[in-house]
Amino acid sequence: MTFPHSSGGPAGRPTFQPRFALGLLYTMAICFASCLLFIAPDLYAIWSSMPADPAMQEEAFRVAREVVRPRLPLALGAGTLVTLVCVRVGVLPGLRRAR
């Protein structure tokens, strides 16, 4: 017999709850989505206007690096912040606290 306050599974042993692994997966997924949101429109504009000349392609890659470099920390920070807020509010499945 288990009591409502016990967190045990069979025979009173604690059940496996992969909160840390789920938290990492959510953080990676939300950071990836925020990178797409912040960076992808500019990369698409550069890619769609890329010429066929190899020298011009190298210039386009340099411009793409200059566009991505300052925005990448912002996108990763925004993704991490959104994940932390979602965990605190309790909207992410698997990371909700028992009530």
Image: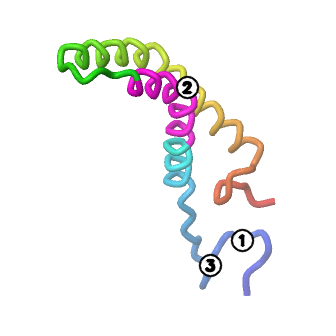
**Mark 1, other Cα within 10 Å: few <14 / some 14–19 / many ≥20:** few
Q: Which mark is residue 6?
A: 1
Q: Residue at x 77, y 77 (%)?
A: 3
Q: Secondary structure at mark 2?
A: helix
Which residue of the protein is positioned furthest toward the left in this rendering? 54
Return the residue nearer the eye: 5 or 75.
Answer: 75
Quadrant occupied by the C terminus:
bottom right
Dot 3 falls on a residue whose secondary structure is: loop
Which tag, 3 or 2, sits closer to the chain's start?
3
Query: Marks 2 and 1, how far apart in space?
Result: 45 Å
Q: Which residues are magenta?
A: 30-48
Q: Nearer the viewer, mark 1 or mark 3?
A: 3
Inter-mark Cα distance, 3 to 2? 44 Å
Q: Which residue is mark 2?
A: 38
Marks 2 and 1, the one that precedes in the sequence: 1
The residue shown at (39%, 21%) is: 49
Q: Label 3 neighbourhood size at 10 Å, few (<14), some (14-19), many (20+)?
A: few
Instruction: Let me know if residue 31 is in the magenta part.
Output: yes
